[in-house]
Image (cartoon, helix red, strand yellow):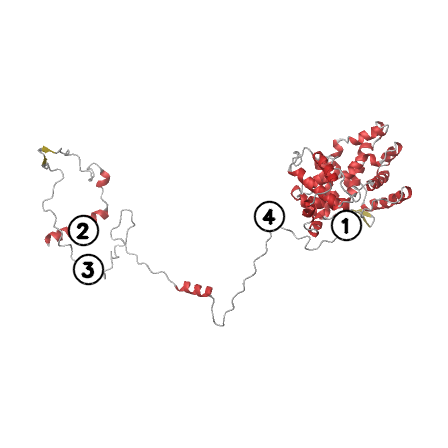
Amino acid sequence: MSQQQGVTQPVPLSPVRLRCQKGIPPSLRGRAWLYLSGGKVKREQNRGKFEELDSQAGDPKELDVIEKDLHRQFPFHEMFVSRGGHGQQDLFRVLKAYTLYRPEEGYCQAQAPIAAVLLMHMPAEDAFWGLVQICEKYLPGYYSAGLEAIQLDGEILYALTRRVSPLVYRHLEKHKMEPILYMTEWFMCAFSRTLPWASVLRVWDMFLCDGVKIIFRVGLVLLKCMLGTREKLKACQGQYETMELLRAIEPRYMQEGFLVREVLEVPVSERDVEREHHVQLKRWRKNRGELHCKSPPRMHGARAIMASEPPSRQDLRQNPTIIVESPLPPPQPTPQLKKGEKSKEEKSKKKGSMKKAPTVMEIPNPYPLAGDPQRDPQLPLRDPQLPLRDPQLPLRDPQLPLRDPVPTLRNSTVQQPLVNDTPLPNTPEDSPPPHQPTLNDQSLLTVSPLQKSTQSLSSIEADQDTYL
C-alpha cells in the first residue's frame, strides 16, 4: 500500500503475480511452475545430471523406503493407480535421483507428494529439478534429519497467529497446543494432502510465485476459520477435541474461491516472515543451542530466486519439443566466375527463353455437323491456292476390277447350290444377313450430313471410274 496526500492506494501488481493469483491455465501450468521455481535455469546449467543420477544404483535402504511409499501417493489418480505403472516408475526415479543428489539429506516421506504433484504437470527430469528448487529455495531444511526447520517455522506461525487472530492464539496457548502437532503435514506437503485438488493448484500457483508466505497465510486462514469464533471454541474443551477439529476442516473453508480470497486478504508479507524468523531463531539458540542442520537461506518467491541466480540468455533459450535439433550442413562455396562469363543457370534460362512453340495451322471442317455453329458464307471452304489433288497420281488403281454392272438385289431369290444332292436350307426372305442391319432399326437409317456428302463424293468417283 502507498500513501499519497492522505489517501491509501494499492500497489499495482505485476502481470505475472496477477496471473498466478487468478490461476495459471492448465495447459501452461507445468511450464510456468518450472520457470517460477527456477527449475528450467537449473536444468540448463546441469545438462545430463539427471540421466547420470538415474543410471546409478542408489542406497538400498533408501530405495526400500521409497518403494513402500509409491502406492500411497494419490492412489486414485490415473498416473499412480497401478503398481509398476509409468507414474510410479517416474516417481521412483525422481526420488532416487534426489537421494543421490543430496546424500546428506536423504529421503523424507513428505517429499513423495511434492514430487507426485510435479509429475502430474511435467516430465520426470523437470519434476526432479522442480523438487530440488522447492527443497533448497522455498522450504530449505524441511526434510533434513531432526526437522529443526519445520519446528522453527511452527514457532513463526504461532507468533503470526497472535497478531492475525488473538482469539485463536489464546485458545492454543490455554491448551498448550504445540504448532508441530497440527502444522507439520500442512507445511511439509505444501497442503497437497489437505486441500481439494482445485485449491491445491491455486495455492501452488501463488506459492511458487510469492514464496513461503503463501503457506503461512493458508495455515492462518484455516486456523481462523475453524477456531475463530466463540461458538466453535465451546465445542473444543481440550487438546484432543481441538486436534480433531483441525483434522476435519469443513469443505466450505477449503473451497477454491473462498480460500484464495481469504489468503489474499491476510496481512502477512515476506518481511513479516523474515522478522519473526530472526526473533524465533534467536530464541531457539538461547533455549536449545545452535541448529544442527545448516540449511541455505530461504528465497521468497520467483523474483528473489532469479535475483540470486540471474539466468543467462542460453539458460532461457526455448528448445523445441517436437523438432530434433541437428547441425546444419556446411555452406557450399560458390564458384568464382571470370569477368564476362555467365553461370549455367543464366545460360539455361536464356536458351529456354529463345525456344518458341511451332505455329499450328487450323484447317476448318468443310462438312459441318448438325450441332456446329453457323459459319460465315463469305469465307471460302478451303485455301484456293492449294490444289485439289496431285495430278500425277491416277484416280484409281487400274489393276482393280470395275464395279459389278449387275448388282445383286437384297430381296431377290437366289438358287441355292446342291451339296451331295441335298439342298441347303434357305434363309428367310425377311431376315437380313448377320453383318447387315435390319430395316426396322430406325437409328441406323438416320444419315448425318457428313455421311450424305461422303456418299455423294464416292458415287461421283465411281461414275468417273466407269466412264474411264
Residue that mark 3 sits on? 390
Looking at the image, is mark 2 or mark 3 earlier in the sequence?
Answer: 3
Three-letter amino acid code at the position of disc 3 = Asp
Looking at the image, is mark 4 or mark 1 earlier in the sequence?
Answer: 1
Three-letter amino acid code at the position of disc 2 = Leu
Looking at the image, is mark 1 or mark 2 earlier in the sequence?
Answer: 1
The kind of secondary structure element at disc 1 is helix
Three-letter amino acid code at the position of disc 1 = Ala
The single residue placed furthest to the right in the displayed view is 286
Residue that mark 2 sits on? 457
Looking at the image, residue 377 lies above or below residue 444: below
Instruction: Residue 291: give x, y in percent of width and height.
Output: 86, 44
The kind of secondary structure element at disc 4 is loop
Give the CA separation, mark 1 to mark 3.
105 Å
Does any portion of residue 67 appear in the rendered image? yes
Q: Label for residue 322? A: 4
The kind of secondary structure element at disc 3 is loop
Instruction: Assess whether mark 4 and mark 2 are in contact (beta carbons under 8 angstroms).
Output: no
Between tags 1 and 2, which lies in front? 1
Give the CA separation, mark 1 to mark 2.
106 Å
Residue that mark 1 sits on? 304
**Residue for point 83% across, 30% down:** 242
